[in-house]
Amino acid sequence: MVKLVIMKKIELISIGQLKFKELKELEKAYTQKINYFTAFTSRSLKDVKTRDEAQQKKIEGEMMIQLLDPRDFVIALDQYGKKMDSLKFAGFLSDKLSYGSDRVVFLIGGHAGLSNTLDARIDLKLSFSDMTFGHDVFRVLFLEQLYRAFTIIKGIKYHR
């Protein structure tokens, strides 16, 4: 009898491209490290250029919704979301990858934030801090925390 193994996937969907070469290199390095543990992809959507922030958020939200499957577990990275330390985040992620959907999707909005049109698709809003971070810096910070979570899950000393 052949045992079917389903590979869980994690995807990051964000608005805008990284602007700094050094951050692009860090993103690539963390993506490679994360892929050691699970199938991970990062998708950057084009910035919407408009003076109307509400319209911008709406359009960006619609672009994100098109990439979501109804079975995805969707986590919005939002300053006002639930806070977890690294150990709790690792435990949460382990549970989602063990017992949850086949794909966990993290969303990072553009400079105007995430659209309210996404609220019906968001399963959890997660905050990393009360502080506001530059978009580029936060993407790399998120990847570092995702990698850190996997090292905690696997008992690798990196997180200490």
Image (cartoon, rainbow, N blue to C red):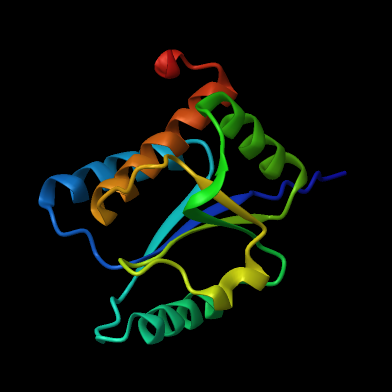
In percent of width and height, residue 119 lies at 61, 69
Instruction: Establish if 51 lies above or below 7.
Output: below
Instruction: Establish if 154 lies above or below 1.
Output: above
Residue furthest toward the right? Answer: 1
Q: Residue at x 77, y 43 (%)?
A: 99
Closer-to-camera residue (145/155): 145
Q: Which quarter of the figure is the N terminus placed in?
A: top right
Closer-to-camera residue (120/52): 52
Task: Locate residue 92 relative to residue 15 in the image: left or right.
Answer: right
Closer-to-camera residue (67/2): 67
Instruction: Establish if 117 lies above or below 158.
Output: below
Q: Residue at x 25, y 52 (%)?
A: 134
Q: Residue at x 30, y 76 (%)?
A: 46
Task: Locate residue 120 relative to residue 117 in the image: left or right.
Answer: right
Q: Quadrant of residue 159?
A: top left
In percent of width and height, residue 102 lies at 68, 55
Q: Which quarter of the figure is the C terminus placed in?
A: top left
Q: Total label count?
A: 0
In percent of width and height, residue 30 lies at 34, 40
Closer-to-camera residue (110/44): 110
In percent of width and height, residue 41 lies at 44, 56
Task: Locate residue 92 relative to residue 47 in the image: left or right.
Answer: right
Q: Quadrant of residue 65?
A: bottom right
Instruction: Establish if 45 lies above or below 51.
Output: above
